[in-house]
Amino acid sequence: MKVIGVGVGRTGTLSLKAALERLGLGPCFHGRHVLDHPDRLPLWRAAAAGQPVSWEAVFAGYASSVDWPGAAFWPEILTAFPAAKVILTERDPESWYASVSRTIYRMFGDGEPDARVAEARRTVPGLDVFTAFHRAMIWDGFFSGRFTDRAHAVAVYREHNAAVRRVVPAERLLVIEPGSGWGPLCDFLGVPEPGEPYPHLNDPERFWARVEARMAESRPAS
C-alpha cells in the first residue's frame, strides 16, 4: 500500500481514486469495491467489532485506498502500512453534509427509500448486503446512529479531520480540497503532472448516473 486516503465519503474521494490510478498508484480501493470482494466482509466486520485484522488481506491486490470504509479505520491502517503516504480530502462541512444527505445516505441510510433506491436494492446483486454493512459500519458506527442530527454529524466530521492533522506527521500528510488540481498531489507524490484535466467524478448527478448504470447492468437481457 503506497497511498492511504483518509478523507470520508463525498470529499472528492472518487476523483482522487481516478487521479491516483492515472499516476500509476492503482488499483485504488474505494468504498464501491466492497461489493467486489464479499469474501472480505468478515474482515471488515471484525474490524468494526474492534478485533485485529490483517489489513494486508483486506487490501490485497491494491496499491492505494480512499473513502469509507477504510477512512473509518485510518489509525489501524496507517500503522499497518507505515511507509504509505497519507492524503486527507476535505471540504466545507455544511456542503459536505448536504452532499452526503443527497447521495450515499439516501442510497444506504435507514430512511424510507424512494422508488429509484428501492429498485436498485432489488436489482443489483449484493446491494442489500452492502447496504446493511454500510449502515452498521458508517451510519451506526462512525456517526453513532445520529447522522440525521446535522450538528452531531458535522462535529464528527470536523473531529475526524482534526484528529488526522494531529496524529499524522506533516511530512507524511497532504491535505487537499476538491478543485486543487494535479499540482499539490503530484508535488506530494514526486511525480510529473499529466497533460490532462484532473478527474471530476464526485457531483451528485454522476453519483446517481453510476447507480443507474449498475442497475442497467444487473437487469436480465430482454
Image: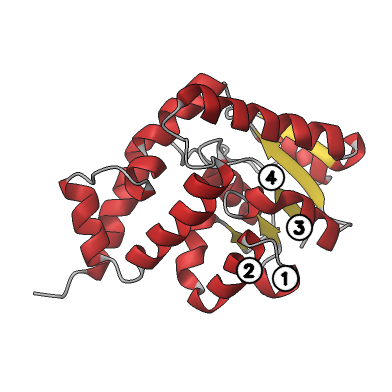
Label annotation for residue 175: none
Instruction: Name above or below for residue 12 compared with residue 138.
Output: above
Mark closer to the chain start, 2 or 3: 2
Check disc 3 and report the residue beneath it.
77
Label 1 crowd (10 A; few <14 / some 14-19 / many >=20): some
Instruction: Name above or below for residue 36 compared with residue 200.
Output: below
Mark closer to the chain start, 3 or 4: 4
Check disc 4 and report the residue beneath it.
6
Q: Amino acid at mark 1?
A: Val
Number of numbered callouts drawn: 4
Position in image of residue 215 (x %, y %):
25, 61
Check disc 1 and report the residue beneath it.
53
Q: Quadrant of the C terminus?
A: bottom left
Q: Residue furthest left?
A: 222
Separation of marks 1 and 2 at Cα, in angstroms = 7 Å
Mark 1, secondary structure of its residue:
loop
Which image quarter: residue 177? Answer: top right
Instruction: Say whether residue 100 is visible.
Output: yes
Position in image of residue 166 (x %, y %):
84, 32
Mark 4, secondary structure of its residue:
loop
